[in-house]
Image (spheres, grey):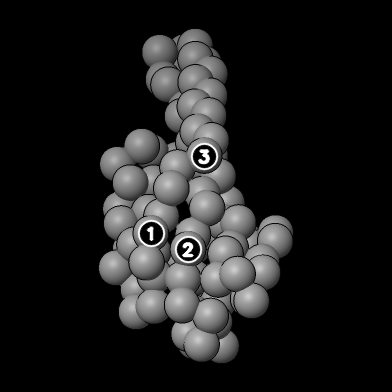
């Protein structure tokens, strides 16, 4: 039996508005990362990250947290899906 995992997290990222021109491409460089909404005046970004393993997702979130200009990263949503497949 083989388990397939899939994780998705919704994050609220608070950042320095003047860093947005650099920060957005840096976030988008993280694989399987999307920015569906942003408000530069307020310094807020909605970020969605996906990964096949929870450890990989945690590493991506930590990478975002460590980017220059990021003040805070708040986990708003997390979903884990596991599907078992029977292999012959």
Which residue carries the number 1 mark?
72
Residue 25 visible in the displayed image: no
Which element is circle 3 on?
Answer: strand
Residue occupying image coordinates x 55% and y 44%: 10
Image quadrant in which you'd find residue 47: bottom right
Q: Circle 2 sits in a helix, a strand or a loop, which is it?
A: strand
Observer-nearest of 22 and 55 = 22
Dot 2, crowdedness within 10 Å: few (<14), some or many (≥20)?
A: many
Query: In which quadrant of the rendered image does the N terminus lie?
Result: top left
Disc 2 marks which residue? 14
Q: Dot 1, crowdedness within 10 Å: few (<14), some or many (≥20)? A: some
Marks 1/3: CA–CA distance: 12 Å
- Place of residue 59 in the rendered image (x, y in percent of width and height, measured from the top left): 30, 53
Residue at the location (48% across, 85% down)? 19
Left or right relative to 43: residue 64: left
Tell me which residue sits at (64%, 76%) in the image. 41
In the image, residue 20 above or below residue 35: below
Q: Which of marks 2 and 3 is in front?
A: 2
Mark 1–mark 2 contact, CB under 8 Å? yes
76 is higher (above) or lower (below) than 72: above
Give residue 83's position: percent from left, percent from top: 53, 18
Q: From the viewer's side, name the closer residue of 44 and 66.
A: 44
Q: Mark 3 points at which residue?
A: 76
Does 34 sit above or below residue 40? above
- In 3D space, how far apart are the residues under numbered discs 1 and 2 (Cα atoms)? 5 Å
């Amino acid at each position: 039996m083989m388990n397939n995992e899939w994780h998705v997290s919704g994050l609220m990222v608070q950042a320095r508005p003047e860093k947005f021109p650099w920060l957005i491409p840096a976030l988008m460089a993280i694989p399987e990362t999307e920015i569906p909404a942003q408000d530069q005046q307020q310094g807020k970004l909605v970020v969605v990250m996906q990964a096949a393993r929870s450890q990989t997702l945690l590493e991506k979130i930590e990478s975002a947290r460590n980017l220059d200009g990021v003040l805070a990263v708040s986990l708003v949503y997390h979903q884990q899906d596991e599907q078992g497949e029977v292999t012959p």
